[in-house]
Amino acid sequence: MRLFVSVTTVVVFFIACEDKSKEIQLSFERYSFDTTVIAHANSYDSIKQIILANLPELFKGVIPMTEGSKYGPKSVYANRFYYSSSHNIVGAKYIDELSPSLFQSLKKQFDLIGPKNITGFEIRSDSTLFCYIRNTHILKFYLDVRESLSWQNTDNEVFPKGPLIKDTLLKNNWTYHIWYDKRAE
């Protein structure tokens, strides 16, 4: 009898997991690219131009990290900056810590885009740029929907492919990414 109860419990658990997995997939398929983000493509391009023109300041004091690639390990420099300290990210850097002229240039573009459509950016030594758009928590699934734009001037793949990742190409080498990610604990 105990074996029957245990087996039944396991079967019910797997059925529940499969149903939740289908719900997550359906939710992901329904999640669409934000037309406001797409409409602001020129403003994201302006941010890119400002960042590329100020790489020495943005990489000041950055230590390279070793990152694996299909060709073996390589040294990569990356630095992240967030728009507002209201994000309370431990150890984060914020654009208001940059020189006054760079801060004002970036702030103007961030304000044009709006706080719901950009939270920060990451610049890498190969000039690959990520603009972080937003993270939306889905309590029901304990997942975050993450949205970002990436721009690169190389043919390297910058974003993984997977079942809960989708992207679309925009103009001027920008790619809009959406992915579901397990909530960090």
Image (cartoon, rainbow, N blue to C red):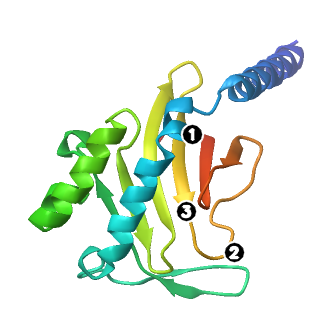
The amino acid pointed to by label 1 is: Lys
List x then y, in percent, for residue 142.
54, 28
Would residue 175 appear left or right of 15 to someone viewing this image? left
For label 2, the SS is loop
Among the 4 quarters of the image, the one containing residue 94? bottom left
- Could you tell me which quadrant the C terminus lies in? top left
Instruction: Name the residue beneath numbered marker 3.
Output: 151
For label 1, the SS is strand
Viewer-proximal residue among 40 and 15: 40
Viewer-proximal residue among 6 and 43: 43
Q: CA distance from mark 1 to mark 3?
A: 25 Å
Q: Tell me the mark number nearer the camera, choosing from 2 and 1.
A: 2
Would residue 107 appear left or right of 184 to someone viewing this image? left
Do the numbered discs 2 and 1 sit on residues whose CB atoms are within 8 Å?
Answer: no
Q: Name above or below for residue 70 compared with residue 121.
A: below
**What residue is at 50 percent from the left and 47 percent from the top?**
41
Q: Tell me the mark number nearer the camera, choosing from 1 and 3.
A: 3
- Residue 24 in sight here: yes
Work out whether mark 2 precedes mark 1 in sequence or the reverse, and give the earlier one: 2
List x then y, in percent, for residue 121.
38, 57
Q: Name above or below for residue 61 compared with residue 148.
A: below
For label 3, the SS is strand
Instruction: Name the residue beneath numbered marker 2.
Output: 155
List x then y, in percent, for residue 43.
41, 49
Q: CA distance from mark 3 to mark 2?
A: 11 Å
Do the numbered discs 1 and 3 sit on residues whose CB atoms are within 8 Å?
Answer: no
Instruction: Name the residue beneath numbered marker 1.
Output: 182
**What residue is at 88 percent from the left and 12 percent from the top?**
1
- Residue 79 in sight here: no
